[in-house]
Image (cartoon, rainbow, N blue to C red):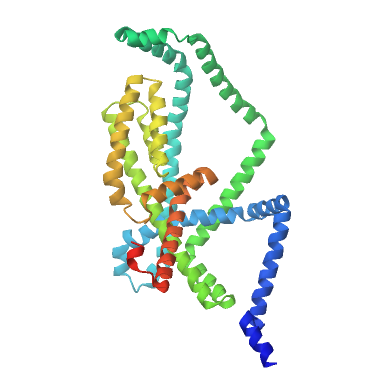
Amino acid sequence: MKWVLSLGERIGIVEFNRQNTKQLMFLIAFAIVLFLALMNLRYASDVFWWIFNIFKPFLLGLAFAFVANVPMKAIETRLFAGINRKYANSKTWKHIRRPLCLILTIVLILGLIAAIIFQVMPELLHTFETLIGNTPTFLNQLQIWIQDLGKNFPKIQQELSQIQIDWSSINRVFTQMGQKVVSSFSDIMGSTITVATNVFSGIFTFTMGCIFAIYTLAQKEKLQRQIRRLLYAYLPEKKVDHFLNLCRLTNSTFSHFIAGQCTEACILGFLCFIGMNIFHFPYSSLISVFVAFMALIPIFGSFFSAVIGGLLILTVDPIQAIYYVIFFLILQQLEGNFIYPHVVGNSVGLPPIWVLLAVTVGGNSMGLVGMLLSIPLGSVIYTLLRKNISRRLTISKIDRKKVL
């Protein structure tokens, strides 16, 4: 009998107690679920999207609440800092502070949306109409400009003369494209039932998301306490501690990223608007707003701003389009070397090479949303991985010179 027990200890037989049995049952259940999901990927995908669509208003509300919490927290802690100190023991102020900050946040967000709708959208529609109407004139000016360029540079004219360009066909193609765009809008509006259904569904989801976000912001401390009590009641304490630390790190990283990127985008858009008006570039308001929005996308946003802005100005004056690209490159250098380090700084804590990798992977996997979320998410993963590597190297007692 003793020989059997010693042999069991040598080959690593584990004693089945209650804890080991629970872990084994969990692993078996997880393996069965994973096997069934892999064998029925199409049905598993349908079930996932069905569940996602059910909880989509609440997930959207959580996203709204997380973004709106950044300005609300700034209003509550900075704008009302003096009032908080003066009425620190006032129960009345404690009761009205959160609703007041929430109302001011909603007014601020609605004001920004209204400014975009009433200021930018009319100019955007006017720009679209102008582009369609000025396409023939632009092509004629481009043809004259190329001919004048050829007169000044005979070698270029000799090369261009070998290229046969049918300007009438190009003009006809652009005109047909404009007509197709207009007719496509008419076709979309013609399917009334489909449009009405999609609009109603979108409005319902958006409204429920906004309502859930307001409730979440109004009672966020109470919700946090309830979630902590739930986790500590049903899960091991150490695992809950690690999970809450991860949540704090994620919240801090995303909050700093959102606040810094929005501030930097506003500054860049304002500087672009001033510079474009000084140099009398066309479409200054539209391009400046577009530059501000694209500044939220790291690395690739500036490239999109330069290309789209240059193409818009190209329809008015090709020379000014070149000047705009030069102006934007100078502005981008100013923003990258002076504005971004001071406004955003190292709050994200991700090296430049990993920023490029995160944006590329996020953009290829989830498009625009992936680009926006990749930087803070990559920063969280980078921080956790860095801490884990440091802990493992410390435990392994690796010579410091080998890892430096």
Whether residue 249 is visible, yes or no, is yes
Say which quarter of the image contains residue 348: bottom left
104 vs 124, nearest the viewer: 124
Q: In this image, 2 relative to 222: left or right?
A: right
Task: Please report the residue visible at 46 percent of the width from the left and 33 percent of the height from the top.
Answer: 121
Q: Position of residue 59 (x, y in %)?
A: 56, 55
6 vs 96, nearest the viewer: 6
> The N terminus lies in which quarter of the figure?
bottom right
Q: In this image, 269 relative to 22: left or right?
A: left
Task: Please report the residue visible at 69 percent of the width from the left and 88 percent of the height from the top.
Answer: 4
Q: How many marks?
A: 0
Task: Please report the residue visible at 29 percent of the width from the left and 39 percent of the height from the top.
Answer: 333
Q: Position of residue 43 (x, y in %)?
A: 73, 52
Q: In the figure, 361 relative to 217: above or below? A: above
Say which quarter of the image contains residue 234: bottom right
Q: Position of residue 131 (x, y in %)?
A: 45, 21
Residue positioned most to the bottom: 2
76 vs 253, nearest the viewer: 253
Whether residue 102 is visible, yes or no, is no
> The C terminus lies in which quarter of the figure?
bottom left
